[in-house]
Image: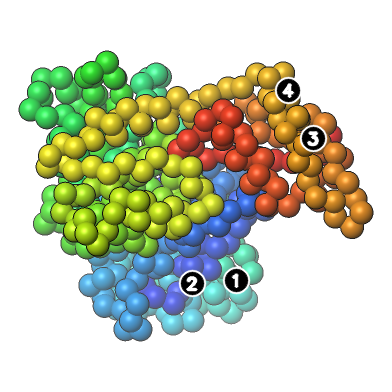
Amino acid sequence: MSNIVAIVGRPNVGKSTLFNRLIQQRQAIVDSVSGVTRDRHYGKSDWNGKEFSVIDTGGWAIGSDDIFEEEIRNQVELAIDEADIIVFVVDVEEGITPMDTEVANLLRKVKKPVFMAVNKVDNSMRENDAVEFYNLGLGEYYTISSINGSGTGDLLDALSKELVEDVIVEDELPRFAVVGRPNAGKSSFINALIGEERNIVTNIAGTTRDSIDTKYNRFGFEFNLVDTAGIRKKSKVKEDLEFYSVMRAVRAIEYCDVAILVIDATRGFEGQDENIFWLAEKNKKGIIILINKWDLVEKETNTMRDFEAQVRREIAPFTDVPIIFTSTVTKQRVFKAIETAVEVFENRKKRIATSKLNETMLDIIKQNPPPAIKGKFVKIKYCMQLPTPTPQFVFFANLPQYVKDPYKRFVENQLREIYNFKGVPVIIYFRKK
């Protein structure tokens, strides 16, 4: 599980530019995988071989121009709670503002590493102007220009020293995270599962600071449940803070094998649900979707089939995901949800023998070859599954650059159909043989 680095600061200091620079460095190294990343505020980065997640808190600010100071304060407090490392961005052109001082006051009390980045420093004159930021009482600062990238290397060098090595938990049990927006029914789902038989449950403190693992062992199933619901007292957080539900989901998703995304049927599949879905997909986790509170939906106006079709439209092109309609009140299909999560977990760690894979796939490819482009014919000679924790396949071809997305999707769909990767993101590469 990687460390979470949160970028905080008042509006217009360049948080998003720094965020984009950090995750692009990463994207330059890594294969760009087709498919849309739909979340502009969360990304992966690495430096000196250490990987970390980056969250841009500014991206969640409420839409109006005069963003309320209270909103910024809430976001900074949440970032302080949830992140492992905080980068506080200030602007050398404007100097110290009252809001900077307020954020600094919050950060001085923090026991976590805090890095102050003085942005827009692109000449020696501004280098001298940056000295005034010592007055914020946060000690050393780093001068950067997030537009052209100068100084970001020094900041990242210092930051990477604070990254904690991943703790590999030697636990063979699957880890299921129950995620979703506030009030979708995550707690009720967990309570319906665990029921009154509390003696079965043992709480193991997870390696994450505060998400508690519940060991579940009933009906012949054994797994760890990572509960993201109700860990923090209600008073501490406004329940409608979207930012909070994403922050919480980031940590749980990175730490699980399968994400159980709980949707409130009375609200439909909203933008926030989609964000959490793509977060799980981007992290290559197994996914199942629970449409909860189905007992409250007017059946005349909304059928299961319509609802499911709408959800699948929203999550295209990755539509091979189990969707289950539940009611935690009547306990309808709660057990089915767990059964399905176990199945998705098994799909995710499935390995296919190379000989078997070639036998099946090369035959299909022969009958449906990639379309010729500019008179060039693509020949695919060999394929194999990569030794990665999640299903990834490589196909060797004479002209891999001519294989386009629609054909990649065709190959992926064939793999899914034949080997059952339901609920699991599958990645396919075409390489020069």
Neighbour tally class for label 1: few under 14, some 14-19, many 20 plus, Cα within 10 Å? some
Label 3 sits on residue: 366
Going by the numbered disc 2, the residue's amino acid type is Gly
Gap between marks 4 and 1, in whole Å?
A: 51 Å
Label 1 sits on residue: 147
Nearest to the eye among marks 3 and 2: give it: 3
Label 4 sits on residue: 359
Is the residue 268 above or below the residue 225 in the image?
A: below
Secondary structure type for disc 1 = loop
Sequence-first tag of 3 and 2 = 2
Q: Do residues under tags 1 and 2 come within 8 Å of each other at their CB atoms?
A: yes
Gap between marks 3 and 1, in whole Å?
A: 49 Å
Q: Do residues under tags 4 and 2 come within 8 Å of each other at their CB atoms?
A: no
Going by the numbered disc 1, the residue's amino acid type is Ile
Sequence-first tag of 4 and 1 = 1
In this orientation, which residue lies closer to the viewer: 386 or 17?
386
Any part of residue 372 in sight? yes
Q: Do residues under tags 4 and 3 come within 8 Å of each other at their CB atoms?
A: no
